[in-house]
Amino acid sequence: MHTSERTPPIHTPMNQFPVQDGELLIGGIPLTRLAARVGQTPFYAYDRQLLTQRVESLRAALPKTLKIHYAMKANPMPVLVGHMARLVDGIDVASGGELKVALDSGVNPRDISFAGPGKSGADLRRAVAAGILINVESFREVAELSRIHAQTGDAVRVAVRVNPDFELKSSGMKMGGGPKQFGVDAEQAPGLLAEIDNAGLDFEGFHLFAGAQNLKAEAIVEAQRKSYELALALAASIPAPVRTLNLGGGFGIPYFPGEQPLELAPIAANLGELSQCAEQDFPGAQLVIELGRYLVGEAGLYVTRIVDRKISRGEVFLITDGGLHHHLSASGNFGQVIRKNYPVVIGNRMASSERDEQEVATVVGPLCTPLDLLADRMLLAKAEPGDLVAIYQSGAYGFTASPRDFLGHPACVEVLV
């Protein structure tokens, strides 16, 4: 059988964006009309109602006392961050640049936290001046913060980011366990806590982030329980009562064929139990989960226009005006060991369901590299130049996670609708 005749593997249904008259609707706007309104392709479009609904559904499922923070590294678009700031309880930043966006969004500085393994002296001074919570990750950071405190007299709010001695099993990206650049090893944490006390810094709690992009509820439950138990063990060394306990995130979304959405109910039940335990073990403390892609990933589309259609030795290639320089992760170059397709559709031909209206095609960008691959032999509606390719699950780690200047092609834009 020829390659182009194989039946491609199936993605979980993508039904967050409705279809009307054969077109995807984003924010209630037909795709071709939105493209005309944007004025160019390629572009990212984020649906603000989907963002709101995701946070509201979490609120309904999780314990009322649990705090939800948005990890803005997933998508730092300023207007989107401003929208999220009105929905969540806090913003987590990973750089001085992200801190500026968070502060500009109007969120209370007391509800901003800062994590990252390489915070510069300038970053730390900005964080102290803003009055945000700093997740310290090394003895060097404590020494630097001690000097800033001595020079300015400003209060320095800190939590300890702990590198646990366990991993989040089955996670797409492991952020803890074994040797890691993130946080301080659990066995070194008591010494760091003593340094914080000696430096006169204001200790507020712990930050434990074991991994990201996990679709197995049982693995997330286990990591949360182990994180809680680790914080409880370290409580013997704390210089002040715990006021915040950040159990991290790890909630994943389905990207690839065969993946299923995360089952939230077991995680919610576990967090309910931990919240009850915290009332006794850490009275007055806030229990926090920190989520990025789970909040925004499914609310975004990447849209690019077909500029050429080619047949090469029997295979169909749809060449677009966008590619890996805008959406590195969809091309497979953002951590995939074996490249797999994101969910991709011809967004203005959604009514094409008959066999004679479909074909197996490969979608590529305009870059002069074979890595510029957006869809590899996928079953798609038959498309021509001018049609619009839409890539689902593009609300997180897209635009800002890509090499936008690579080969000097035009930039894309982002819109919130």
Image (cartoon, grey):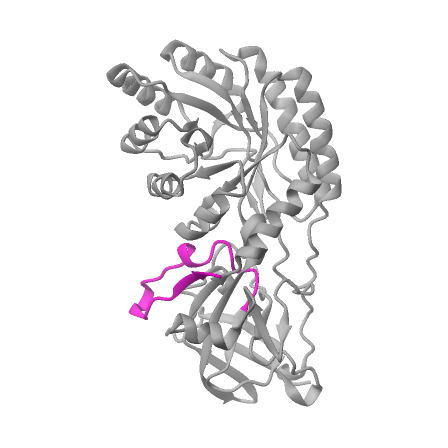
Looking at the image, how many numbered discs can be counted on the residues? 0
The answer to whether residue 410 is magenta is yes
Residue 292 at what x, y percent from top left? 53, 46
Q: Nearer the viewer, residue 255 or 272?
A: 272
17 relative position to 371: left or right: right
User: Can I make out residue 77 in this image?
Assistant: no
Q: Quadrant of residue 408?
A: bottom left
Q: Quadrant of residue 14?
A: bottom right
Name the residue at 40% across, 55% down. Answer: 400
The single residue placed furthest to the left in the displayed view is 151
Q: Residue 138 vs residue 300: left or right?
A: left
Residue 103 shows in the view = yes
Instruction: State the residue at coordinates (43%, 39%).
Output: 93
Is residue 303 shown above or below 151? below
Residue at 55 percent across and 63 percent down: it is: 339
Q: Which residues are magenta?
A: 391-417
Q: Quadrant of the N terminus?
A: bottom right
Q: Please check the rendered image and state whether residue 400 is part of the magenta-colored stretch, yes or no.
A: yes
**Could you say which is closer to the camera, residue 227 or residue 290?**
290
Q: Position of residue 373 (x, y in %)?
A: 48, 71
Q: Looking at the picture, how far across and down is residue 34, in whole percent? A: 47, 72
Residue 360, percent from left and from top: 62, 81
Q: Is residue 44 above or below residue 56?
A: below
Which of the 4 quarters of the picture holds residue 289?
A: top right
- In the image, is residue 392 above or below residue 167? below
Along the viewing direction, whichever of 79 and 208 lies nearer the viewer:
79
The residue at 68%/79% (across/down) is 6
